[in-house]
Amino acid sequence: ELKVEQNPLFLSMQEGKNYTIYCNYSTTSDRLYWYRQDPGKSLESLFVLLSNGAVKQEGRLMASLDTKARLSTLHITAAVHDLSATYFCAVPGGGADGLTFGKGTHLIIQP
Amino acid sequence: KAGVTQTPRYLIKTRGQQVTLSCSPISGHRSVSWYQQTPGQGLQFLFEYFSETQRNKGNFPGRFSGRQFSNSRSEMNVSTLELGDSALYLCASSLAGNRFSPLHFGNGTRLTVT
């Protein structure tokens, strides 16, 4: 059974600081997705990581994938309040080829 | 380009009733998936449709069903509602034939069962 684990599940940090969210998954996968969800809103696609060693950056967010370690990281640089949201990673499989999501990391960035 | 549209946004039903939710995908997207989001279980895959055929189904009871029409619009139905069916139901569309494209989610239908 595919398991996707994120940590931490809750993170409160100050503006200007750096931090990393981790996503581990239990079976081999050729891709991994990161999504963002604001309260009461839908999921917004952030990154699609397709190969080992893939690194993608958008603004203050950078995501990487290590398929051998079955690990993806989402790094936040010099956090700003607008990045406050819940971040999900997702891997194909586990539910008859649908995406299996992690529990999400609830990120609060305080001034 | 219009995004994924789900209707209605909110629904309140009582136990034992049935409900139908609707989803219109992004124009040109032929694959539609449905997910259930709850505080306890998180996001869980329900099913995926492509060309009016159910391609994949998650681990949900038969009370949950869906269909897709020739214009790629999709509906999901939940019969004999239970309290535990209260959730945010999210529809997502993607480009068929491109297994690496991300899912594009709608704003969801929030179902409350009383």
Image (spheres, rainbow, N blue to C red):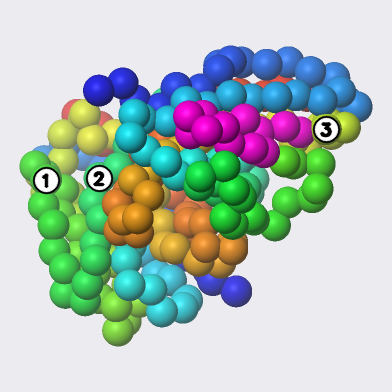
Where in the figure is residue A58, as x and y percent of width and height?
Answer: 11, 45
Where in the figure is residue B58, as x and y percent of width and height?
Answer: 64, 56
Q: Quadrant of the C terminus of chain B?
A: top right
Image side of residue B71 versus residue A55, left or right = right
The answer for which chain carries disc 3 is: B
Q: Secondary structure at mark 2?
A: strand
Q: What's drawn in magenta, residue-wise?
A: B66-78
Residue drawn at x 38%, y 73% is A29
Residue drawn at x 29%, y 34% is A84
**In this rendering, the label closer to the viewer, 3 or 1:** 3
Which label's residue is closer to the chain start, 1 or 2? Answer: 2
Name the residue carrying label 2: A46
Q: Please say if B86 is above or below A30.
A: above
Q: Secondary structure at mark 3?
A: loop
* Near-viewer residue (B61 or A20): B61
Asked if residue A37 can be seen in this view, the reply is no
Q: Assess disc 2: are there few (<14), some (14-19) or many (≥20) residues with their C-alpha within 10 Å of its C-alpha.
A: many
**Number of marks drawn:** 3
The answer for which chain carries disc 2 is: A
Residue drawn at x 34%, y 29% is B27
Image side of residue B75 versus residue A31, left or right = right
Name the residue carrying label 3: B79
Name the residue carrying label 1: A58
Q: Amino acid at mark 1?
A: Glu
